[in-house]
């Protein structure tokens, strides 16, 4: 019996289907690591070159536009992959309609950010950078070709384009540093990167014997896609607000109290620390992705096993938080000074506080498994909106008194409510609250659950 089971397992591992999906996942991982590494290395040189004030101006403009990125994604990517798998015969119709919807979203984004920039009476340099970064979004509709390759489990094709974009974009930014380029050119880098991605996917699409000229818009398909995606649009806007609003609010609030230059420098310090902590966010994502199949199978087979695997996941994520955040808390300041220079010492102190955020990041990523398996997508929409609203409110209270430190505590407070406390108000989510508490409270009991 053991030989039969073992033979079956070996046959599964040797099957073409398994190898295909393993290669697909491996390429996605390589893509993520290469892009992360290139961004980190480039950020060190760009940040040192620009200094806190100019780096703050660039990140203010980037965050200002980034709040509305959901308008060009329109929540369509996963839906498009799903429907391309189900109806490959409607490829041109789906891709053409999705591209058109995203183009309309880019128009709305551009108009929105320019009107808001004018209403805020920002200086000319920031307005120009906002215009350039927002203009890059007009190229995003062409990247729907990526979803075609992902729907065919050809992540290696998409990954090659994304890796090329990351490397060429990094070389462009490093070139700007070597040439001592003015600040505005670093905003142009967003257009260059988006153009590389759009061109890369269209060229690759053509090499597969296909042409984007065959894409066509269909009104019925558009209504269907928008009806499917509107909750994801709101969800995406809420997430982007929670992720990007801090940098904008630090700049807006403090320029009226400590002056424009000092406010920009504060944004620069905060942004440098934020980029470092965001770079660590891919680790829990990999852990959760690797555990997801086992948790999903348990959900279908055995409720007790499902519960134990979720609890074990939270235990593992809490251990990961301890392993990463404790050293980071003590080493953040010297590391930031070593990488970015003495003028970013304040960013090191902020990074040590950001280490606390990793706890909520890890638990939030793990909670995604529960939401997905229980199909609680409307609930996740509520948590995102509550978190974004609370973050904005707390920023208004804490930033004037505590500056960027207040923004960190506002973020932590909003995460605490949206990830933990909101569960108590929804009957379907209360079991997950107990499982999270159990996982955190018994993290040393982690064990293999077959």
Image: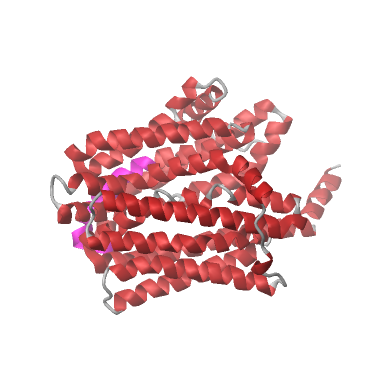
The image quadrant where one finds the C terminus is: top right
Toward the bottom, the furthest residue is: 179
Res 260 → quadrant: bottom left
Residue visible at 29% across and 41% down in the picture: 408
Prevailing secondary structure class for the magenta stretch in the rendered image: helix
Does residue 277 show up? no
Does residue 46 show up? yes
The picture places residue 207, in percent across and down from the top left corner, at 68, 74
In the figure, is residue 331 to the left or right of 75? left
Q: Which residues are magenta?
A: 340-357
Q: Nearer the viewer, residue 70 or 158?
A: 70
In the rendered view, tell whether residue 294 sits above or below residue 205: above
In the figure, is residue 392 to the left or right of 199? left
The image quadrant where one finds the N terminus is: top right
The picture places residue 300, in percent across and down from the top left corner, at 72, 32
Q: Is residue 422 magenta?
A: no
Q: Nearer the viewer, residue 273 or 111?
A: 111
The picture places residue 108, in percent across and down from the top left corner, at 45, 51
Toward the left, the furthest residue is: 258
Residue visible at 33% across and 68% down in the picture: 186
The picture places residue 185, in percent across and down from the top left corner, at 32, 71
In the figure, is residue 430 to the left or right of 22? left
Q: Nearer the viewer, residue 278 or 81?
A: 81
In the rendered view, tell whether residue 323 sits above or below residue 163: above
Q: Is residue 344 magenta?
A: yes
Residue visible at 80% across and 57% down in the picture: 15
């Amino acid at each position: 019996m053991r030989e039969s089971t073992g033979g079956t397992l070996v046959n599964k591992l040797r099957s073409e289907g398994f190898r295909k999906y393993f290669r697909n996942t491996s390429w996605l991982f390589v893509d993520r690591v290469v892009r992360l590494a290139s961004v980190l290395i480039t950020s060190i040189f760009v940040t040192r070159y620009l200094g806190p004030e100019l780096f703050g101006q660039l990140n203010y403009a980037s965050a200002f536009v980034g709040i509305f990125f959901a308008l060009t994604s329109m929540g369509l990517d996963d839906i498009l992959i799903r429907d391309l798998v189900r109806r490959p015969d409607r490829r041109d119709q789906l891709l053409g309609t999705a591209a058109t919807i995203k183009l309309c979203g880019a128009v709305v984004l551009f108009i929105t950010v320019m009107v808001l920039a004018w209403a805020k009476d920002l200086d000319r340099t920031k307005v120009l950078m906002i215009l350039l970064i927002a203009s890059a979004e007009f190229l995003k509709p062409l990247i729907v070709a990526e979803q075609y390759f992902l729907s065919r489990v050809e992540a290696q094709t998409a990954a090659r384009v994304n890796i090329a974009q990351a490397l060429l974009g990094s070389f462009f930014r490093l070139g700007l540093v070597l040439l001592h380029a003015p600040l505005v050119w670093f905003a142009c880098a967003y257009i260059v990167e988006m153009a590389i991605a759009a061109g890369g996917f269209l060229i690759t699409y053509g090499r597969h014997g296909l042409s984007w000229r065959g894409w066509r818009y269909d009104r019925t398909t558009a209504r269907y896609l928008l009806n499917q995606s509107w909750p994801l649009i709101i969800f995406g806007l809420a997430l982007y607000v929670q992720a990007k609003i801090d940098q904008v609010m630090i700049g807006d609030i403090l320029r009226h109290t400590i002056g424009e230059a000092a406010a920009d420098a504060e944004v620069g310090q905060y942004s440098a620390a934020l980029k470092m902590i965001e770079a660590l966010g891919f680790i829990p994502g990999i852990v959760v992705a690797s555990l997801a199949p086992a948790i999903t199978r348990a959900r279908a087979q055995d409720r007790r096993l499902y519960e134990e695997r979720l609890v074990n996941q939270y235990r593992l994520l809490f251990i990961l938080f301890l392993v990463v955040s404790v050293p980071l808390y003590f080493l953040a300041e010297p590391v930031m000074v070593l990488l970015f220079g003495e003028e970013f010492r304040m960013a090191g102190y902020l990074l040590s506080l950001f280490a606390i955020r990793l706890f909520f990041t890890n638990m939030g990523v793990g909670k995604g498994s529960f939401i997905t398996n229980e199909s609680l997508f409307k609930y996740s929409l509520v948590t995102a909106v509550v978190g974004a609203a609370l973050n904005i409110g707390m920023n208004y209270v804490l930033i004037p008194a505590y500056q960027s430190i207040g923004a960190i505590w506002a973020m932590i407070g909003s995460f605490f409510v949206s990830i933990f406390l909101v569960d108590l108000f929804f009957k379907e989510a209360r079991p997950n609250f107990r499982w999270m508490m159990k996982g955190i409270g018994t993290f040393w009991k982690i064990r293999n659950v077959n």
